[in-house]
Amino acid sequence: MAAGCTVRTPTLDIGYDAYGEESAFPLVLLHGFPDDAHAWDAVAPSLAAAGYRVLVPYLRGYGPTRFLSATEPRMAQQAAMAQDLREFMDALGLERVGLAGYDWGGRAACITAILAPERVRALVTIGGYNVQNALASPRPASAHEERAHWYQWYFNTERGRVGLEQNRHGVCRLLWEEWSPTWHFDDATYAQTAPSFDNPDFVSLVIHSYRHRHGNAPGDPRFDQVEHYLATRPPITVPTIVLHGADDMVSRPRRSENDMAQFPPGTPRHVIAGAGHFMPREKPQAVVDALLTLIPSTR
């Protein structure tokens, strides 16, 4: 493993971890909120041992990843996250990759598969069709689902912004506990990732992400056309496996079941018992098996 790697894109210095031989076929693994590249620590070595080059970037606003310009808008709408992924691939000279991701990273992976399918050999999406319609007002959900999204309403208030700034570790750890109730992580596991939330842009980007998706913050005009296209729910056409944690308390399995028409006919969907929202940490072998099914090892 090579930790502490960086690569420069037009917008960011992206920190990433790398595993395996540089000449091997590349797989890019993308973490979500609130997490970082350590989410894949039990996945990436197995994939490298199977003969792949595995690259695990830190998303904008996390860990060592930094904006190049102080004047670049600190926005984290879905189109920007997907653009970061494609620019990461360009900077490393990756013409075609396999992708896996969840939450924010799953959104970037799904959108890249939609916008640049020729560059995505296969996709493992945890949580299903992670693309949002950022142009429409969200419809009310069940009482249980609305309660699970308390953090989104909190972040849409000034109190929530200040609260995240002052108590980011308390908020993030609570979300780990709530979203994956059967995952009994220890203090050391959380402490390994917690410094990523001290990134100087973490709070601004989290607040923008959750306000933009609810129509309470403007998007970057450069992505208007992309956001309008994504609002039409375009299908994903690359070979895909959908994984969903049976105990995911923020994104219930029913959601991915309802979205299977957005994937190629016959796309497998596996609901993984004993896994919540943070599946790469909780059930890493399920992710490894899905990627090896889609892109068989040559070793």
Image (cartoon, rainbow, N blue to C red):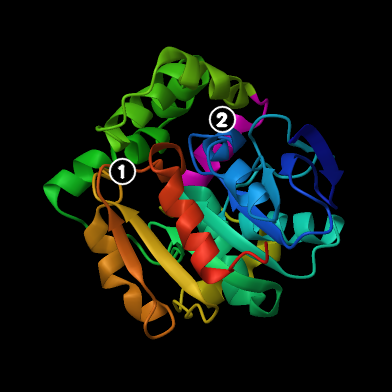
Q: Residues within 10 Å of mark 1 (few under 14, many from 20)?
A: many
Name the amino acid type tagged 2: Val
Residue 115 disc label? none
Residue 254 higher or lower than 162, as above or below: below
Quadrant into which the C terminus falls: bottom right
Magenta-colored span: 199-213
Residue 229 higher or lower than 134, as above or below: below
Quadrant into which the N terminus falls: top right
Q: Residue furthest front?
A: 299
Residue 51 in percent (x, y) is at 69, 56
Which sits in the foreground, 166 or 17? Answer: 17
Q: Which residue is mark 2?
A: 203
Residue 176 in percent (x, y) is at 37, 30
Q: Residue at x 66, y 31 (%)?
A: 201
Q: Residue at x 20, y 40 (%)?
A: 147
* Residue 81 visible at all: yes
Residue 275 disc label? 1
Q: Which callout, 2 or 1, points at the residue further toward the start of the chain?
A: 2
Name the front one of labels 2 and 1: 1
- Inspect the magenta stretch and tell me whether residue 211 lies in it: yes
Q: Residue at x 41, y 35 (%)?
A: 155
